């Protein structure tokens, strides 16, 4: 039989999913690997979905999404970020994951290059590869607060580079871009005529200061911003995300979304509308909880002389296990086997993170604290003395 699509067959595996599957068979495992809030979606959002079901929201919607949802998003973003968006710039999708895929489909041809962060969420590399484009990784180093360094980007850019993907607040680093960094990246993109795909799905989860939107500094129309409700409103299963783009790009997305998903679920769109139009105290409360957990867990690692990196946003923390002296591919598996703790293996985020793990702060307090102690015990046992 003829071969399957090589770009799919050769796709690198998703390390977080692998650990989730393995740990599912271990009854008392502590789960620090998953990238989703450990609480249920707020009641007023769930109620909006129930009303949508009974109110006839059971059909296809416009390709770009329900007008009422897009209006709610525009009101929210304009108010929060001082931008001046119009409704035609919002493209609603099934999760931010589809907004990212759609952006790459619309902006990048097969064979062209896309700059992606190292470390970064594994889906970026998979997405670029699946459409026959070439990912080029730029390193985010702890000594530069995990922020992109322009000289490194300059070294990587070629005539074939079409876009740069940025992510702030960043998964798995927790880094948050400041104004200076955003301006530097936009100047770099402008200098090489690149599109900027800016993944901002953790925009409301920032512990110090406030998230800044690259699109509000973009006067050339080269930024496509990606947002979603999964992380901010504990809505991972509802599958709603969206792209915010210059109108000329949105018009092409409107065509390209039809053969991809046609539209996002109407019921979930009504739920997302309630998230954006309703009270925001849930997000503020969760942010406080994540920050408190971050500080407590960071202290546990510091006291045990384990190197961890304090995130400025998101609900993740990177922990350096290089002192354990184990082969990079084995660290997360051994932690699961020996201590019953499931963590995201660093190597799935890129080569720079081979000897790290990522833990999720979106975990019940008791489990998180116990999990952190077990990670320390594991390192102590394997430490190269
Ligand atoms: N972007 C980043 C950086 C993520 O970590 C994730 C999910 O883990 C997503 C996008 C996808 O979000 P969604 O659930 O909206 O598809």
Image: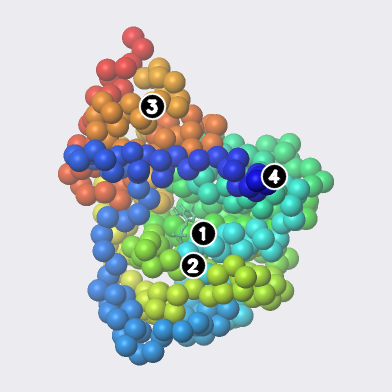
Instruction: State the residue position of label 4.
Output: 134
Spatial CA distance of label 4 from label 1 is: 18 Å
Label 3 residue SS: helix
Q: Which residue is mark 3?
A: 331
User: x, y percentage for residue 305?
Assistant: 31, 24
**Residue drawn where x is 40% and y is 17% of the image:** 325
C-alpha separation, residue under disc 2 versus residue under disc 3: 33 Å
Give how far across and how far down residue 74 sits, in percent: 52, 78
Mark 1 nearby-residue class (10 Å; few <14, some 14–19, many ≥20) = many
> Does the closest atom of ligand 1 sit within 8 Å of the Cβ of label 1?
yes
Quadrant for the C terminus, please. top left
Residue, x 40% and y 25% (percent of image)? 330
Q: Looking at the image, is mark 4 or mark 3 earlier in the sequence? A: 4
Precedes in sequence: disc 1 or disc 3:
1
Q: State left or right for residue 124 relative to residue 381.
A: right
Marked residue nearer the N-terminal end (4 or 2): 2
CA gap between label 4 and label 2 equals 25 Å
The quarter holding residue 287 reads bottom left
Let me know if residue 115 appears in the view.
no
- Name of the residue lying farthest toward the right: 159
Earlier in the chain: of badge 4 and badge 1, it is: 1
Secondary structure category for the residue under label 2:
loop
Q: Are marks 1 and 2 in contact (CB under 8 Å)?
A: yes
Q: Tell me the residue that label 2 is attached to.
A: 94
| CA–CA distance in space, label 1 to label 2 | 7 Å
Q: Is residue 72 above or below residue 381?
A: below
**Of residues 97 and 358, which is closer to you in this image?**
97
State whether residue 156 appears in this view.
yes
Which residue does the image show at 41% across and 84% down from the upper left? 58
Ligand 1 is within 8 Å of the C-beta of the residue at disc 2: yes
């Amino acid at each position: 039989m003829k071969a399957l699509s090589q770009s799919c067959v050769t796709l690198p595996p998703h390390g977080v999913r692998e650990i989730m599957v393995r740990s599912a068979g271990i009854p008392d495992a502590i789960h620090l690997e998953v990238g989703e809030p450990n609480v249920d979606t707020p009641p007023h959002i769930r109620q909006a979905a129930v009303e949508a079901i009974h109110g006839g929201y059971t059909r296809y919607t416009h390709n770009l999404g329900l007008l009422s949802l897009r209006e709610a998003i525009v009101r929210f973003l304009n108010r929060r970020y001082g931008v001046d968006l119009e409704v035609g710039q919002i493209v609603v999708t099934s999760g931010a994951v589809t907004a990212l895929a759609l952006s790459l489909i619309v902006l990048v041809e097969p064979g062209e290059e896309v700059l992606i962060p190292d470390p970064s969420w594994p889906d970026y590399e998979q997405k670029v590869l699946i459409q026959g484009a070439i990912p080029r990784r730029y390193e985010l180093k702890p000594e530069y607060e995990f922020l992109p360094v322009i000289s490194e980007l300059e070294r990587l850019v070629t005539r074939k580079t079409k876009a740069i993907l940025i992510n702030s607040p960043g998964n798995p680093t927790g880094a948050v871009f400041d104004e200076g960094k955003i301006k530097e990246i936009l100047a770099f993109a402008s200098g090489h005529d690149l599109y900027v795909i800016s993944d901002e799905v953790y925009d409301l989860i920032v512990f110090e200061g406030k998230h800044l939107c690259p699109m509000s500094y973009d006067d050339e129309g080269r930024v496509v911003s990606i947002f979603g409700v999964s992380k901010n409103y504990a809505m991972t299963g509802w599958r709603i995300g969206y792209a915010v783009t210059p109108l000329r790009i949105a018009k092409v997305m409107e065509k390209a979304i039809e053969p991809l998903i046609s539209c996002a679920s109407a019921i979930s769109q009504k739920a997302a509308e309630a998230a954006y139009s309703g009270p925001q105290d849930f997000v503020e409360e969760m942010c406080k909880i994540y920050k408190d957990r971050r500080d407590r867990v960071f202290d546990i690692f510091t006291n045990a002389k384990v190197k961890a990196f304090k995130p400025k946003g998101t609900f993740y923390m990177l922990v350096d296990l290089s002192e354990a002296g184990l082969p990079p591919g084995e660290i997360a598996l051994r932690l699961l086997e020996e201590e019953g703790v499931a963590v995201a293996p660093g190597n799935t985020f890129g080569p720079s993170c081979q000897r790290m793990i990522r833990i999720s702060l979106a975990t019940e307090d008791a489990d998180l604290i116990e999990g952190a102690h077990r990670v320390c015990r594991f390192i102590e046992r394997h430490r190269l003395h």
